[in-house]
Amino acid sequence: MSVVGFLQQLHDSQLGTALRESLYIFPLVEGTHLIGLALSVGLILVTDLRLVGLFLRNVPVADVLQQLRPWVLAGFAITFGTGILLIWAEGPRIWQIPVFPLKLVLIALAGINAFWFELKYGKTVSVWGDNPTFPKGAKLAGWISLVSWSAVVICGRLIPYLDATQH
Amino acid sequence: MSTQSLFQSLQNSALGSSIGKLDPLVGALAQLFHIAGLLLILTSIVLVNLRLLGVGLRNQSLPQLVKATTPLVWYGLGLLVLSGLFIFLPSAAIYYPNPAFWAKFLLLSLALLIQITLYRKVTSVEYPKRGLATATAIISLTLWFSVAFAGRAIGYI
């Protein structure tokens, strides 16, 4: 089955249809997706800015990473959950808009970067976190995260603007 | 002049009409700046309010955390106001009958009021009283997130 075929199935399903035709639920899901960014993207940007030394410099990086992590993850659970619902309702249409697949690629990139960072540097943060300069790889991961999540948000906002079918 | 005709004349103004003639993608840019401003404020108050609730960056000095985030709140507000004007002016007349528009500004006034009174007072000490800190965090978070939701609802009504 092709991607479009799969998305069409979701679209035609009871859940997809109910979401699309709802008066309040769809706006609520979309609103939560956007506003949940404050928790997910907002807090991960705080973490990244700490890694690259631009924000909360007198807070131990281990604290920033470990104490904000549960909230970042909760934020992403909300963002991804609502995002999946949005795809469920509108998949075939938004798949035709190039910035949408691009957005998914950027999310994958950001995710792989985060995973790599956690594996390589996450566990030993209490060790390297006390040094005056952080490992180059950790800082690089911070920059990649900053850039890719910002690009994800930009692509997301452009989806309705670059939809040729709506003009 | 009635509010309604004020809105209409704002839309018809030189600034309002010239913005209205721009490419729609410029509108997308304005919305992105609006999102950026929103994230600056919301993330800042999330950081401080989590601390008030005794979670998140709980080892940090409360006044220090406020000090670090206050500039971000101001930048955020600045971005929101400027981008907001850009979004509002060319279409002012259609916002007038929109209940979400008015709800947003009512909630925003409340949020700002709490920000400069209760929030400022409670976060000025290292260890505010537990009950007061919790109440402040809940009120602050509820108000600011309500502003955001009302703002988003404008586009739907």
Image (cartoon, grey):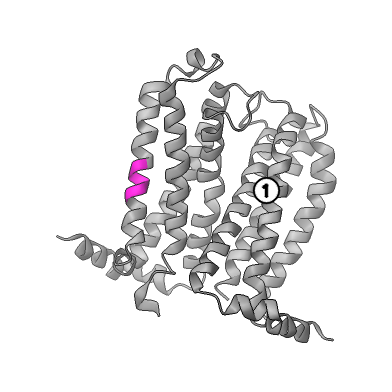
Q: Quadrant of the C terminus of chain A?
A: bottom left
The residue located at (44%, 16%) in the rendering is A124
Q: Is residue A31 above or below residue B70?
A: below
Q: Which image quarter: residue B98?
A: bottom right
Is residue B98 shown to the viewer in this render? no
Subunit that carries the residue with mark 1: B
Q: Which residues are magenta?
A: A105-109
- The one of A158 and B109 positioned closer to us in this rendering: A158
Q: Position of residue B150 (x, y in %)?
A: 63, 65
Q: Is residue A70 above or below residue B71?
A: above
What secondary structure is marked by label 1? helix
- The one of B77 and A70 positioned closer to us in this rendering: B77
The residue located at (72%, 71%) in the rendering is B102
The residue located at (37%, 22%) in the rendering is A120
Q: Position of residue B84 (x, y in %)?
A: 66, 65
Mark 1 crowd level (few <14, some 14–19, many ≥20, 10 Å Cα): some
Q: Is residue A133 above or below residue B42?
A: above
Residue A108 in the figure: left or right of residue B103: left
Instruction: Give the residue type at disc 1.
Output: Leu
Residue B1 in the figure: left or right of residue A124: right
Residue at the left extreme, as displayed:
A1
Instruction: Give the main secondary structure of the magenta stretch.
Output: helix
Q: Which image quarter: residue A132?
A: top right
Q: Which residue matches tag 1?
A: B141
Q: In the rendered structure, does residue B94 fall within the stretch colored magenta?
A: no
Q: Quadrant of the N terminus of chain A?
A: bottom left
Q: Position of residue B65 (x, y in %)?
A: 71, 32
Q: Position of residue A8 (x, y in %)?
A: 25, 67
Is residue A141 shown to the viewer in this render? yes
